[in-house]
Image (cartoon, rainbow, N blue to C red):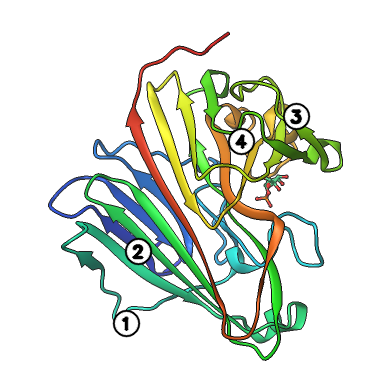
Amino acid sequence: VKDWNGIDQVVLRAPRGASARASLHGGQVISWRNGRGEELLFTSSKAIFRPPKAIRGGIPLCFPQFGNCGSLEQHGFARNRMWVVEDDPPRLRTGESTGCVSVDLLLRPSEEDLKCWPHCFEFRLRVSLGADGDLSMISRIRNVDGKKFTFSFAYHTYLSVSDISEVRIEGLETLDYLDNLCNRERFTEQEDAITFESEVDRVYLGSPDVVAVLDHGKKQTFIIKKEGLPDTVVWNPWEKKSKSIVDFGDDEYKQMLCVDGAAVERPITLRPGEEWTGRLELSAVPSSFCIKN
Ligand code: TA6
């Protein structure tokens, strides 16, 4: 389908008539709805739709650099580029066996990109929606250059939540984390679950392949499964920081939480011909629990 700027937007609809769906704008998932048509990802009401610039929300891809710990623009250039829908004409792959519908996209560096990051790569992204509404993303990054290169990566995932004060993350307890609010100093998580009372901007290191985000208000839990992504970024800007971000609505920090499958602490090095794979699977399941006070 063509979107607001005549840009190809791909809409995945769950097979066999279920009403789950996911929408992509280039390589960015910008919407993921469950079987009841409820939106599960956050998108700012002040999002700036100026393709190919990434919009504030959904799941922008941070590559070849996470954050601003390098010479490139914040989070690298991949999220601000036009991706090619590999199936031409675009056709959606319905895997009968797995009951999922998927689309493949491809990004190669432009001449501009090569000026600031002189490494030839092929980044193939497959986004799939399962019959059960689960969303999965597989990134395959291949070094097609003559020399090795190193990159960091994150699926910058903006989850929609009822109210940040009703949300708890389980699975990151006892881990070390780098705290972006304290010059990336290293700390150890002391709590038995992460709850939110102020700005949080951390990279949890060596996190498990499954992290749960429990939303008491929605009686729902996000299950985040990941492979090849040893770190988990947790970010909520809170009120003051979100007011300083032009494409963030004033009180919207209450309705969002970034929990990103990432490879940050130990960037990935690929020799010529080598390929890295990073997998993310998101599901949203009903759950009833109380927030431990
Ligand atoms: O989530 C970690 C982080 O690096 C935060 O420090 C904050 O900058 C956030 O990403 C958003 O970055 P963006 O470039 O999307 O505004």
Give the image location of residue 80, x and y in percent.
60, 66
The correct choice, above or below, for 46 with respect to 188 in the image is: below
Name the mark on residue 10: 2
Cα separation, mark 4 vs mark 1, equals 38 Å
- Identity of the residue drawn at 53% across and 46% down: 157
The image quadrant that residue 171 belongs to is top right
Cα separation, mark 4 vs mark 3, equals 11 Å
Q: Nearer the viewer, residue 212 or 77?
A: 212
Q: Nearer the viewer, mark 4 or mark 1?
A: 1
Q: Amino acid at mark 4?
A: Gly
The correct choice, above or below, for 44 with respect to 262 in the image is: above
- Mark 1 sits on what residue? 88
3 or 1: tag closer to the N-terminus? 1
Cα separation, mark 2 vs mark 1, equals 13 Å
Name the mark on residue 249: 4
| Mark 2 vs 1: CB contact within 8 A | no
